[in-house]
Image (cartoon, helix red, strand yellow):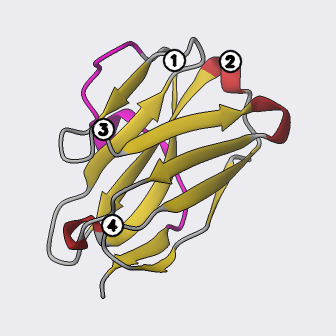
């Protein structure tokens, strides 16, 4: 059974940084791709970043240049480094997994992902 556990959310001042973790249970990374999404109250779920098992990556336009997605295969953990946080980055951040192959520039659509974590709250506020 696949289970995704997000860790590392919290309150940070604008301009600050945060590192989110997602521990992945029950799937073999070589058959899946992993990603991060976020959702603010009253808004649709938005793609932040995704990474394939071949190293291919996609970043959302609103965060490009400020976030980095990475994977520690030995620890079965996905990371998201958030830098220069802005108030509009506030929201619930979700880890997600999809089966098959990712490719560079593939659109970040929630419908491409089949397994989801419960989320971790990130708040950028002074």
Which residue in the protein does label 4 denote?
15
* Badge nearest the viewer, 3 or 4: 4
Asked whether the residues under the numbered discs 1 and 2 touch, taking CB atoms below 8 Å apart as contact, a structural biologist would say: no
Q: Which residues are magenta?
A: 103-119
Quadrant position of residue 85: bottom left
Note whether 85 is above or below 67 in the view shown. below
Distance CA(mark 1)–CA(mark 4): 36 Å
What x and y, as percent, mark residue 95?
51, 52
Which residue in the protein does label 2 denote?
30
Residue in the picture at 15% in, 67% down: 43
Distance CA(mark 3)–CA(mark 2): 27 Å
Q: What's the magenta bit mostly, secondary-structure-wise?
A: loop
Quadrant into which the C terminus falls? bottom left
Q: Nearer the viewer, residue 119 or 20?
A: 20
* Badge nearest the viewer, 2 or 4: 4
**Mark identifier at residue 65:** 3
Badge 1 local density, few (<14 within 10 Å), some, or many (20+)?
few
Q: Earlier in the sequence, mark 3 or mark 4?
A: 4
What x and y, as percent, mark residue 27?
72, 35
Q: Earlier in the sequence, mark 1 or mark 2?
A: 2
Residue in the picture at 44% in, 47% down: 36
* Badge nearest the viewer, 1 or 3: 3
* Badge nearest the viewer, 1 or 4: 4
Q: Nearer the viewer, residue 112 or 83?
A: 83
Magenta segment: does it hold 33?
no
Q: Nearer the viewer, residue 44 or 51?
A: 51
Distance CA(mark 3)–CA(mark 4): 14 Å
Circle 1 — which element? loop
Which residue in the protein does label 1 denote?
100
Quadrant position of residue 112: top left
Q: Earlier in the sequence, mark 3 or mark 2?
A: 2
Distance CA(mark 1)–CA(mark 2): 9 Å
């Amino acid at each position: 059974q696949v289970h995704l556990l997000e860790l590392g959310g919290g309150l940070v001042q604008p301009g600050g940084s945060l590192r989110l973790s997602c521990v992945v249970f029950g799937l073999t990374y070589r058959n899946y791709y992993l990603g991060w999404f976020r959702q603010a109250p009253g808004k649709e779920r938005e793609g932040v970043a995704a990474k394939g098992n071949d190293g291919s990556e996609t970043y959302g336009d609103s965060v490009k240049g400020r976030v980095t997605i990475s994977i520690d295969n030995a620890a079965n953990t996905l990371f998201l480094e958030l830098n220069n946080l802005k108030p509009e980055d506030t929201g619930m951040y979700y880890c997600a997994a999809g089966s098959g192959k990712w490719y560079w520039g593939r659109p970040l659509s929630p419908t491409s992902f089949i397994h989801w974590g419960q989320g971790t709250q990130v708040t950028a506020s002074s």
